Image (cartoon, helix red, strand yellow):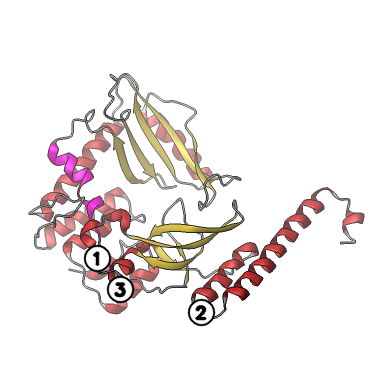
Amino acid sequence: MNNPEAYEFINSKDVRGHLASLNYQLTPVQYAFLVWQSKRHTLAQKHEAWRDIIDTLPDCSVPERINCKGWDSLHAVLRGYIALEQRLLSRFQSDEHGAVYEYEAWERVNVQSVPGDNGYRWNGGFRLFCSYDACYQQAHAYAREEHCRFRITKRYIDTSPDASDYDPHITVEYDAGGNMMDVSFMNCNFFSLSEEENALWNESFTGMWFDIPIPFKKGDIVCDNASIYKAGIPFVLLGTDPWYRKEHAKAESYYADYIDMNAHGYSYDHALRFFNDDFRVDYLNLEHWTEPLRGPEKLLYAYRQFVKGEIDAYTLLKLNRMIQAEAAAEDERKMLKSYLRDDFWSKY
């Protein structure tokens, strides 16, 4: 296996560099998983990489796990997954009676309604299209102008009620250049998935879990560089799921899946004006935070020192009080300056 090619599908440049320095050997299943979870590659690039695995690497089994069915052949899994995604994309792009399209753009808004997010939202969904081409053209033009990613959802409106599942739809996400990055859907019954296809979609990659080395330690200030929902938010790293399972012998890795491949710590939440004490991201997305922290986010410097044992709790509390007071004073200064006359404001 060409490890550098596999490393390229890891979202974090710091993790990629760390694995390269270790010459860390990935298994074919790990390689396939890294392709699946990449936020940096298009669907076409992922399918190409999976075909390369099939053509160049020996076949192997996919181990059964708590939420992974297990297969005798990784190659068969990859062929089936590619075929399923292509079938979904073909139907997505085919105009059908009783189906409409809508698009949304990923844009920054002024309000943080969810603690721990980065202030971005999916905006749009106000206009419906009967044609995929018409919807794509308008969405792509808007995304080019605003330099943002977008998504299109195809909704089936003339369907019988199904109390056992969600309203059927297919959603495709695109980068700002209009390249397909991800496809998802709801209602397996409506799309007539076979038992094997259902297992491929719900019990393959999402059920995997790996402990891959990362170059971070407790107390580092890091950020998620890939998730659109949490990218660019610095936080003090306190632990990861693999670290926890190593420290607690009874925490078997078998009872974990992709959702548990996370890192957690404290971020500063501007909406709450305090720490978000349960900030979680994928640990393979982590990168060192290299920008200076400003305003109340400087609290993270203090908390990092506390976690590393460089200051005590008393000093941490004093620093918290000072930093919060400075931030509050700056907010008042901006507010007053916005409506005081210049000759009044010049005195302050």
Q: Residue at x 62, y 56 (%)?
A: 273
Residue 273's tag is: none
- Residue 163's spot in the image, x, y percent? 28, 25
Look at the magenta stretch and give its main secondary structure: helix
Name the element at disc 2. loop
Pointers 3 and 2 in contact (CB under 8 A)? no
Of the residues tagged 3 and 1, which is closer to the observer?
A: 1
- Amino acid type for the residue under numbered disc 1: Lys
Name the element at disc 3. helix
Name the element at disc 1. loop
Report the magenta residues as a range. 195-211
Quick check: is 290 in the magenta stretch? Answer: no
Q: Residue at x 15, y 45 (%)?
A: 80
Q: Earlier in the sequence, mark 2 or mark 1?
A: 1
- Residue 230's spot in the image, x, y percent? 47, 54
Mark 2 Cα shell of 10 Å, populated few (<14), some (14-19), many (≥20): few
Residue 309's tag is: 2
Identify the residue position indicated by label 3 in the image.
19
Q: Residue at x 50, y 43 (%)?
A: 121
Q: Residue at x 13, y 55 (%)?
A: 74
Q: Is residue 222 left or right of residue 130?
A: right
Of the residues tagged 2 and 1, which is closer to the observer?
A: 1
Look at the image and tell me in which quarter the C terminus lies.
Answer: bottom right
Q: Is residue 89 left or right of residue 337?
A: left
- Residue 77's spot in the image, x, y percent? 14, 50
